[in-house]
Amino acid sequence: LFSLLTALRPPLIVLYLVEIWMVLKPGSPFKSSFYSLFVASAVVDLIFVIGTLHEYRLKMFPLVNGMFENYSCQECVRTRMALSFMCPFTQDLLNCFIALNRLTSIWRPVTHSSIWKKLLPFAVGFSHFLSIFVF
């Protein structure tokens, strides 16, 4: 299982980067507030994947651990624990804002873009800062 997870991590990172680039590149048709929330969610996923890559790699290559006397990557464990609570919490908050975005696009189609022009920076900032504050 660890070999599968380790092998899939680099292609997954590339896939996230391509996804983010497709939305953010100049001339992209994906310029609405929904896609901005989607990119914020993808960045959180990317942080989680990159943040836990080191620990999965150490599980796969235990010989690296033997190079250092009493090496027990406590910092890796702390980082993984923090990310495994912060990233899903941030994802849940962003999903709530995505649902609110879809609701306002149906409820107020005429004023939807003006509402989200003001609400989008708050939604992304609030989601990230609340998860950091809580955890």
Image: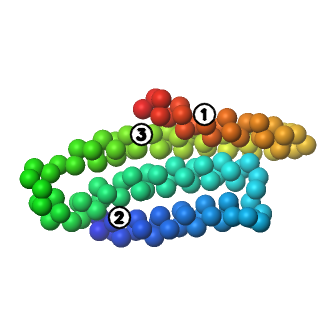
Mark 1, residue position: 126
Query: Considering only vertical position in the picture, is 85 above or below 9?
Result: above
Spot occupied by residue 23 in the image (x, y as percentages of width and height)? 68, 61
Q: Residues within 10 Å of mark 1 (few under 14, many from 20)?
A: some
Residue 37 falls left or right of residue 112 = left
Q: Quadrant of residue 1?
A: bottom left
Up the image or down, 119 lies above or below 1; here it is above
Q: Quadrant of the C terminus?
A: top left
Toward which corner of the image does residue 57 lie, by quadrant?
Answer: bottom left
Circle 3 residue: 85
Work out which residue is located at the far top of the displayed protein and give it: 134
**Vertical placement of 27 versus 86: above or below?**
below
Give the mark, 2 or 3, whose residue is nearer the N terminus.
Answer: 2
Q: Determine crowd level at label 2: few under 14, some 14-19, many 20+ residues with C-alpha closer than 10 A.
A: few
Determine whether the residue tagged by mark 1 lies in a helix, strand or loop: helix
State the CA–CA distance, disc 2 to disc 1. Answer: 31 Å
Q: Is residue 63 above or below residue 36?
A: below
Residue at figure coordinates x 45%, y 39% from the top left: 86
Real-space CA distance between mark 3 and mark 1, rounded to the nearest whole angstrom: 16 Å
**Callout 3 secondary element:** helix
Q: CA distance from mark 2 to mark 3?
A: 20 Å
Residue at screen point 73% across, 36% down: 119
**Mark number, residue 5:** 2
Q: Is residue 115 left or right of residue 4?
A: right
In primary-sequence order, the first of circles 3 and 1 is: 3
Q: Amino acid at mark 3?
A: Phe
